[in-house]
Amino acid sequence: MKRAVIALALFIALNSQAISADTEHWNTLSQNQREALAPMSMQWDDLPKAQRHHLLNVAKHFPNLSQTEKQRFLSRLEAWSKLTPEQRQAARDKYRAFSTIPEEKREQVRQMIKREQEEKQR
């Protein structure tokens, strides 16, 4: 009986933690989390749970960034927030492909991409 009570208490505790982590609404986030994730505020409650969880993990590091790093982070997150789901998936795919390139060739690829982007802007 005692084991059953302990098991039940453990089960309830674990499930309540999982539920609270999965149902983090924008207005329940801490001030630091809202500051770090501000570009996502309008769509936060509609994001998939996995994406919210990932962003919350990223936001943990935000207070430790320099002001320049914070601006860069927010700028990139704002650009990300404006992408369509298809564009986001394409960006993820490109990132995965880039990750497979050997380290010694990555700089070459970066320069090639930079040149292509500059040509597109002309």
Image (tube, rainbow, N blue to C red):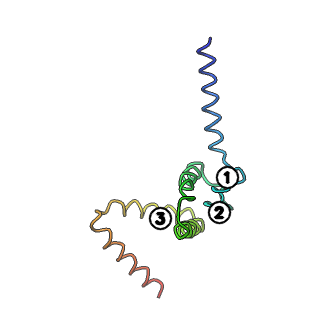
Q: Pick whichever of labels 1 and 2 is earlier in the sequence.
A: 1
The residue wearing badge 1 is: 30
* Disc number for residue 38: 2
Q: Pick whichever of labels 1 and 3 is earlier in the sequence.
A: 1
Could you tell me the amino acid type at mark 3? Ala
The residue wearing badge 3 is: 91
Report the residue at 60% width, 32% height from top. 14
Report the residue at 64% width, 39% height from top. 19
Camera-nearest residue between 100 and 74: 74
Across and down, in percent, residue 114 comes to 40, 78
Q: CA distance from mark 1 to mark 3?
A: 29 Å
Could you tell me the amino acid type at mark 2? Ala
Which SS class for mark 1?
A: loop
Report the residue at 57% width, 58% height from top. 63
Could you tell me the amino acid type at mark 1? Ser
Q: Pick whichever of labels 3 and 2 is earlier in the sequence.
A: 2
Q: Around disc 3, counting alpha carbons within 10 Å, would you say few (fewer than 14), some (14 to 19), or many (20 or more)?
A: some
Marks 1 and 2: which is nearer the front?
A: 1
Residue 44, image quadrant: bottom right
